[in-house]
């Protein structure tokens, strides 16, 4: 059971906009800790997609954006492309688990 | 250029101890604010954080696994070693090491190794 909750799957047609939610609690996201997002293709390591709630590392297309509010965060992908089909994970920090990084259960994005 | 690479046995028997080595380049673990974590992913399942070692040798472990884990670093060799005792079939997973970047009061993982699949079977 992951500390952060994500929907198991989302889907969308090419060109559409999809969002992936990440719900935490008062000891992690709700406590003000930042949320970070990773993209993972089958058989490969996760790749940092968003850090600090809404910042994109160099090279990440601006079709990817994210936000945080209260005890939740969300990742949005606009202009959906077939190459976006992957697993997406949110990650934060939890004050009740000293030093721990906590992950969401992951969301499989299917491009229809 | 930052790179990390995991190495260790692909197969271990139940009850054995697993030792994994993360060899990295492009940064120094003696630099203030730097850390390296181990994260695993069972086949078809989610990421699970295991342990972290900081530049100042502070160490943190997953609450559920802390009695079985030990993390250490050799700064001169640019290596971080994770040992996990009493391996079981449920520990079958791809094990990743990742560089942690401290950010405000938390941290994120900006570089990851390719991962190494460890199967626990007799």
Image (spheres, rainbow, N blue to C red):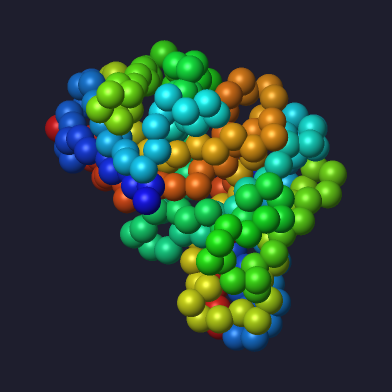
Residue A3 shows up from this direction: no
Drawn side of residue A20 relative to residue B79, left or right: right
Q: Residue furthest top?
A: B67
Residue B114 position, x and y percent, is: 32, 50
Residue B108 position, x and y percent, is: 57, 41
- Residue at 73%, 47% in the rendered image: A23
Question: In the rendered picture of this protein, how many numbered marks are placed on residues?
Answer: 0
Q: Work out which quarter of the rendered image holds the C terminus of chain A and state it.
A: bottom right
Drawn side of residue A17 relative to residue B69, left or right: right
* Vertical placement of residue A104 versus B59, above or below: below
Q: Nearer the viewer, residue B34 or A36?
A: B34
* Vertical placement of residue A85 versus B39, above or below: below
- Residue at 22%, 38% in the rendered image: B7
- Residue at 48%, 44% in the rendered image: B47
- Residue at 36%, 43% in the rendered image: B26
Residue A40 position, x and y percent, is: 46, 59
Residue B10 lies in what quarter of the image?
A: top left
Residue A26 shows up from this direction: yes
Drawn side of residue A67 relative to residue B29, left or right: right
* Vertical placement of residue B72 versus A34, above or below: above
Drawn side of residue B55 relative to residue A56, left or right: left
Q: Work out which quarter of the rendered image holds the N terminus of chain A and state it.
A: top right
Q: Nearer the viewer, residue B51 or B74?
A: B74
Q: Residue furthest right?
A: A70
Residue A101 lies in what quarter of the image?
A: top right
Residue A62 lies in what quarter of the image?
A: bottom right
Residue B16 position, x and y percent, is: 20, 22
């Amino acid at each position: 059971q992951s500390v952060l909750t994500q929907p198991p799957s989302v889907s969308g047609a090419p060109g559409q906009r999809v969002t992936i939610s990440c719900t935490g609690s008062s000891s992690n996201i709700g406590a003000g800790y930042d949320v970070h997002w990773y993209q993972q293709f089958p058989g490969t390591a996760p790749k940092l997609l968003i850090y600090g709630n809404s910042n994109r590392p160099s090279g990440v297309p601006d079709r990817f954006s994210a936000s945080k509010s209260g005890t939740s965060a969300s990742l949005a992908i606009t202009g959906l492309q077939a190459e976006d089909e992957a697993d997406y994970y949110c990650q934060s920090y939890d004050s009740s688990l000293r030093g721990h990084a906590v992950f969401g259960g992951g969301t499989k994005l299917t491009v229809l | 250029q930052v790179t990390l690479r995991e190495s260790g046995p692909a197969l271990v028997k139940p009850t054995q101890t697993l030792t994994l080595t993360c060899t990295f380049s492009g940064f120094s673990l003696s630099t203030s604010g730097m850390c390296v974590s181990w994260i695993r992913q069972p086949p078809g399942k989610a990421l699970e954080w295991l342990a972290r070692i900081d530049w100042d040798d502070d160490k943190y472990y997953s609450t559920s696994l802390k009695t079985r884990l030990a993390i250490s670093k050799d700064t001169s060799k640019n290596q971080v070693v994770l040992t996990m005792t009493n391996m079981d079939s449920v520990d079958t997973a791809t094990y990743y090491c990742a560089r942690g970047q401290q950010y405000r009061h938390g941290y994120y993982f900006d570089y990851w190794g390719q991962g190494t699949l460890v199967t626990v079977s007799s």
